[in-house]
Amino acid sequence: MTLLVSDIMENKDPASPGEAPPRCSFLRAVGLITGDMRLFGEWVKRQVLVVQLLDWVLRGVAQVMLLNNPISGLLIVGGLFLQDPWWAVNALVGTFISTVSALLLGQNRGAVSAGLHGYSGTLVGMLMAVVSAKGSWYWWLLLPNVFMSMLCPVVSSALSSLVGKWDLPILTLPFNILLFVHVAATGGNHPYFPQVDFKPNDHLLALNESVQSLDVSQLFLSVPVGVSQVYGCSSPWTGGVFLLALLLCSPKSCFHAVCGSAAGMLSGLALAAPHQDIYSGLWGYNSVLSCIAIGGGVFYVLTWQTHLLAVLCAFLCAYMNAAVCNVLSVLALPAASWAFSLSTLIFLLMSSEIRAICRVPPSAVSRPEEETRRRRKEKSERKNKTAVDLTPSVYV
């Protein structure tokens, strides 16, 4: 479990400076770079705006995976450069422009510093480069990238006002809407910004494909590839870097990311999807995000009930992605992450009389390990209070 510096300071035994054990120093160093790096965030607040922007941009890149850690964001940026430097440049430009636009529009400073106004720009910039038919280093693409990224905080604020009435997060809805606007406005025959051809997908098993032709090693690799597809990447090495970024911030989120990608892969097999689509991780990325959001302790308190709920949501997400792909490909539009947004919102709107299924409002969302620790502390305090109340009074 990830450790925080505050936890280490509260639990360690007092010792003189010369007697401090090496293990204590190691845990202190680990606590500085894991979790949400709260102490680092407090230090950044006292620095110049350029340092603050760098921290906010990196947190924005990581928030695509529902993480709030600049080191995780730095690892993800490294993974993007490993996949395609041009895609990484567009992702960073989108994150920077959307973050600065949120500042200029007077959005909540705490949300900006946590990267919540940057992740939509990350996805918009990244996916505009992915779906562009002009290939790498087509610099004119930065013009629509900047324009759409500037609109990210506007759309995010508008959607927050709408879904906030039900105490729901906006997830990746701003990205989905703005990517749709760009692709629908340009199309495949645009002279300056043409898009790749989104042909209708045939999800029936090809005649030359069968269960016997499955490559087991490729199936196993499709799990990290599914994680990398959250950012539109298709390399297992990139997926491994992303899993490391998840592990650094939240081991629970990392575990649920693997579960979600595996659920997507199994759903692809169940629906007889083309093997290449399964190997390339296209069946896993939406399930990765939904499993982290529901079962990773982000929007639900992590219990064994919510863990099962997350797996169920991951399977629904994969099935919905197949349906969305079939419908939108007729309109020559990408599926984006509509399946994740719709499936997760359905599960967040669900009501239950089971006390273990407890939803966390967006305003109170924190790191899964921190939320679990807080709930455990509250439970212990209630138990101690009950024990004190039941203790019989003794009169002398």
Image: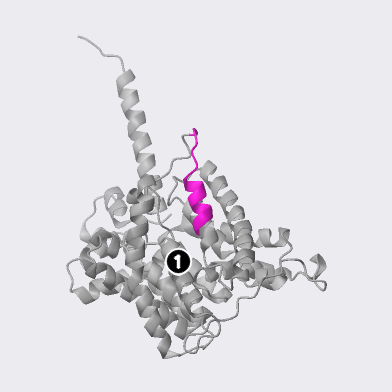
Residue type highlighted by circle 1: Ile
Is residue 283 at least partly visible in the picture? no
**Residue 16, position in %: x, y?**
21, 56
Q: Quadrant of residue 160?
A: bottom left
Judge left or right: residue 234 versus residue 107.
Answer: right
Q: Quadrant of residue 263?
A: bottom right
Residue 324 vertical position relative to residue 96 in the rendered view, above or below? above
Residue 234 vertical position relative to residue 353 in the rendered view, above or below? below
Judge left or right: residue 325 versus residue 367.
Answer: right
Residue 28 falls within the magenta-colored stretch: no
Counting other residues with Cα less than 10 Å from the Cα at mark 1, is it few (<14), some (14-19), or many (20 or more)?
A: some
**Residue 32, position in %: x, y?**
31, 63
- Residue matched to label 1: 177
**Residue 90, position in %: x, y?**
41, 81
Query: Which span is picked out in magenta?
Result: 341-354
Q: Which residue shows up at 26% across the image and 59% down it?
A: 110
Q: Nearer the viewer, residue 50 or 142?
A: 142
Q: Nearer the viewer, residue 268 or 380?
A: 268
Helix, strand or loop at label 1? It is: helix
